[in-house]
Image (cartoon, helix red, strand yellow):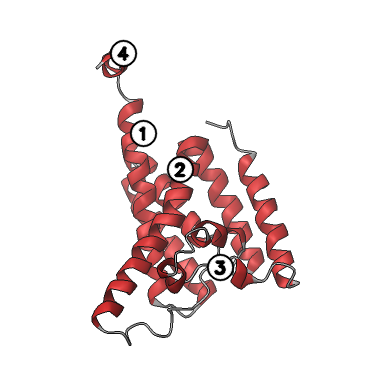
């Protein structure tokens, strides 16, 4: 399970470098951050690039990314952890943006305050990792820990961020994405070798 642990510090290093460059305006945040409006405009790549800049406070964001990422890789494996990260970050934003776009198609004045709001950071990835870890704990019979972990993480996130917007719903969807990624992988892992051979030949 410890294979691939080095990918987390490597990713944190890239995020740290890009964050410094964004603070120096070498890479302006708005050129990397997604917004609900950017999805409507067809700038889909911003859903991915928005993860390259740490939100404020940057030190706490990167530290949280490191700690939770290392735990996710150690408990879930590198493949599952990074699948959860990718799906959690991208799909959670796409779901919320699509919901906002639908609401605005009914009422054009809805969510006017966030339609061009820069949405970036590692928090959705962290939430997806927490979902993956919580699923692993649940599957091992540690039910209280599995329930307490997302609650505690949510409280810590709220403490650092303070004010919340509708975009913060992404964290709930990212958490669900982390769980959704782990479930089929866990089912496959508990199959016997004979069952796996049968599945391949079908």
Quarter residue 92 falls in: bottom left
Q: In this rendered view, identify the residue nearer to me: 69 or 180.
A: 180
Q: Mark 3 or mark 1: name the one nearer the start of the chain.
A: 3
Task: Return the residue at label 3.
Answer: 33
Q: In this rendered view, identify the residue nearer to me: 156 or 190.
A: 190
Task: Return the residue at label 2.
Answer: 83
Quarter residue 17 falls in: bottom right
Badge 1 vs badge 4, beta-carbon distance below 8 Å? no
Q: Mark 4 or mark 2: name the one nearer the start of the chain.
A: 2
Q: CA distance from mark 3 to mark 1?
A: 31 Å
Which circle, 3 or 1, is nearer the viewer? 3
Image position of 101 (left or right of 61): left
Residue at position x 30%, y 69% from top?
Answer: 99
Q: CA distance from mark 1 to mark 2?
A: 11 Å
Other residues around mark 3 within 10 Å, as few (<14) / some (14–19) / many (≥20): many
Residue 79 x/y as whole percent: 49, 36
Which circle, 2 or 3, is nearer the viewer? 3
Residue 83 vs 63, above or below: the answer is: above
Instruction: Provide the secondary structure element on which disc 2 rests.
Output: helix
Badge 1 vs badge 2, beta-carbon distance below 8 Å? yes
């Amino acid at each position: 399970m410890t294979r691939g642990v080095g990918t987390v510090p490597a990713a944190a290093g890239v995020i740290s470098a890009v964050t410094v460059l964004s603070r120096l305006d070498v890479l302006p945040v708005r050129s990397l951050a997604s917004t609900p409006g950017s999805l409507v405009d067809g700038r889909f790549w911003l859903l991915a690039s928005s993860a390259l800049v740490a939100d404020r406070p940057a030190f706490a964001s990167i530290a949280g990314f490191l700690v939770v990422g290392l735990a996710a890789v150690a408990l879930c494996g590198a493949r599952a952890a990074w699948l959860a990260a990718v799906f959690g970050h991208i799909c959670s934003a796409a779901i919320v943006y699509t919901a906002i776009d639908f609401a605005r198609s009914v009422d054009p004045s809805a969510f006017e305050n966030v339609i061009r709001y820069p949405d970036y950071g590692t928090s959705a990835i962290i939430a997806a990792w927490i979902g993956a870890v919580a699923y692993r704990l649940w599957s091992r019979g540690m039910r209280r820990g599995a329930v307490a972990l997302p609650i505690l993480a949510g409280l810590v996130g709220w403490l650092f961020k303070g004010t919340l917007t509708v975009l913060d719903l992404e964290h709930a969807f990212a958490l669900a994405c982390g769980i959704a990624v782990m479930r089929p992988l866990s089912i496959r892992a508990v199959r016997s070798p004979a069952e796996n051979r049968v599945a391949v030949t079908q």
